[in-house]
Amino acid sequence: RRRHTRYWRDWSSDVCSSDLIGRFDASAVFVAVLMAAIVGAMFAMVLMAIRRVERTALMPYGPFLMLGAVIAMSTTTRL
């Protein structure tokens, strides 16, 4: 039972981060999530290639979401 609360905390922080990105610049949300997915996937592949994590390991998404937001806000124009 305790295991699910840990996952909920991780998930809720990602939702709060997305909300903050949307409040700052709504047009950058799609680009931020897309960049976060791409950067996170590349990071996970590198870690799997050097045998630091297994395929079933859980990785935090928040840092990649913040990095994607920085990339999106620096490359998109405000509508």
Image: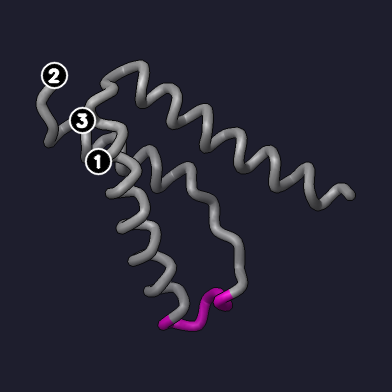
The answer to which of 73 and 52 lies nearer the viewer is 73
Hey, what amino acid is under mark 3? Met
Which residue is pictured at 31% across the width and 17% down the height?
A: 24
Q: Secondary structure at mark 3?
A: helix
Name the residue that disc number 3 marks: 73
Q: Distance between the Cα atoms at labels 2 and 1?
A: 14 Å
Which residue is pictured at 46% across the width and 78% down the height?
A: 48
Q: Give left or right: position of 44 versus 69.
A: right
Going from the N terminus, do you reach mark 2 or mark 1 first? Answer: 1
Going from the N terminus, do you reach mark 1 or mark 3 first? Answer: 1
Q: Which mark is residue 79?
A: 2
Q: Distance between the Cα atoms at labels 2 and 3?
A: 12 Å
Stretch in magenta: 49-55
Q: Residue 77: name its quadrant.
A: top left
From the image, state whether disc 1 or disc 3 is nearer to you: 1
Residue 41 image position (x, y, % from top left): 38, 64
Residue 61 image position (x, y, % from top left): 49, 48
Name the residue that disc number 1 marks: 31
Magenta region includes residue 24: no
Q: Give left or right: position of 9 versus 59.
A: right
